Amino acid sequence: MRVLLIDDEPFVLKLLARQLANLGFEQVVAMEHPHDALAMLESDPGAFDVVFLDLQMPDMDGVEFVRHLVRIQYPGGLVLFSGQDQRILHTVEKLANAHRLHVLGALHKPVNPEKLKKVIETAPPCHERAARKIYAPDELRQAIHNNELFNHYQPQVELGSGRVVGMEALVRWQHPDDGLVYPDQFVGMAEEHGLIDDLTRTVLANALEQARQWHDAGMGLQVAVNVSMDNLVALDFADYVAHEVERAGIPLASIMLEVTESRLMKNPLTPLDILTRLRLKHIGLSIDDFGTGHSSLAQLRDIPFDELKVDRGFVHGAHDYAPLRAIVEASLGMAQHLGMKTVAEGVETQQDWDFLRGTGCDLAQGYFIAKPMPAAAVVDWMPGWESRQPTLIKKKS
Ligand code: C2E
Ligand code: MG
Ligand code: MG
């Protein structure tokens, strides 16, 4: 495990390096100047597995540094530490989390060795970091051609009854050498290199085949498929989807398309045309990652979505953090006023679950319920979930 320490006080650096050495972490680089540390990370964002970041530094504060980590897509773990008020530490932690950085924890100075041990033990092992490789468009093209893409499915359950009502299809790449590769390593690339249509068609075909099997088995599950805004540039997309769903022999309403806008559209009229026609055909439309990027109020105003998914950056931990709670409640309130179904993503703990039950949110999705899994694992997961249901829905929220 390679660790980078950033703090303007040499004494703190020395102490922390010694504490880490006592815990068996020898590959530690200590830097007094955040600009130097940043330059190093810019040239190789994956050079370290964990970065320890002091919040109060004269050249660049921790919040600015976090912003740069987001910009360079730093993939490793982050530990924040500071002698400041706990609440500031907490706020920066939430901020970094909302930015999707992998925050391992926040430590108050002087750092307590026990807490340090706990935090660093949650860091993912090196081999997981090493697997983050950049793939070339041709490799992905070949993978699609060789049927190396398949879907995992993550359950969506009713908060009121605990009933499983849907499954979100999440694409995975079974790479012949690298093992399982996650979508954050290739979906963006597919969008940039004109491969997103092939990718989406593959995911949709697999999802429809699976949906039909569940349908035939009498499990009335709605299957959600992620669609990129870059899919919504060819006017025949709505007809294509409707045709494929009909060909699979399942009701149009049992498919939900989740749309995220990761970048601003040059021509917003074509997506509007396509999305509206999908709705006219009774295919479900969901606004994904609501509250982030461009998944925003203007989208709600302009596009006839029938479901809103609150981004997990707002959901997890909202129960004990007033600003997140306010955002979740406001988002849900808006959706309810618009007659939309609501889904909370990133439900990771019992507290998240209990909090959401009190909000009137319809569906929950997250690790607390189940991690995404191969379709074949769903039947094994189901009885365990059903046995948890009574306690989860009886509990007063
Ligand atoms: P998303 O659509 O918002 O999907 C939810 C992501 O959150 C999934 O990551 C899922 O594994 C993860 N997740 C679920 N529950 C929890 C939780 O409780 N805690 C945390 N921390 N994470 C949770 P995954 O599978 O890595 O997918 C990442 C993103 O990649 C997706 O975000 C989606 O935007 C995109 N994606 C996945 N499959 C496809 C696809 O077939 N087509 C397109 N265009 N995008 C896809
Ligand atoms: Mg999604
Ligand atoms: Mg999402």
Image (cartoon, rainbow, N blue to C red):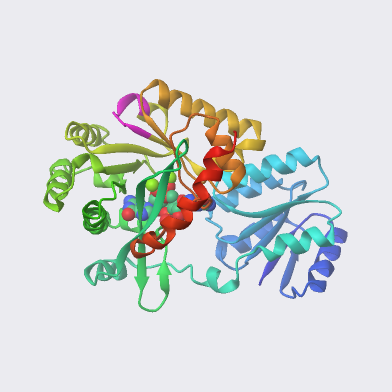
Q: Residue at x 59, y 72 (%)?
A: 126
Picture quarter with ligand 3: top left
Q: Is residue 181 above or below residue 335?
A: below
Q: Residue at x 33, y 41 (%)?
A: 259
Magenta-colored stretch includes residue 302? yes
Q: Residue at x 59, y 38 (%)?
A: 395
User: Residue 353: which quarter of the image?
Assistant: top right
* Residue 192 shows in this picture: no
Compare residues 194 and 149 and report the one nearer the observer: 149
The answer to whether residue 10 is left or right of residue 81 is right
* Residue 337 shows in this picture: yes
Position of residue 119 measured from the top left corner of the image (x, y, whole percent) = 72, 59
- Specify start and end residues of the magenta stretch as a single range: 300-307
Magenta-colored stretch includes residue 344? no
Q: Is residue 126 above or below residue 158?
A: below
The answer to whether residue 85 is left or right of residue 126 is right
Position of residue 84 measured from the top left corner of the image (x, y, whole percent) = 81, 42
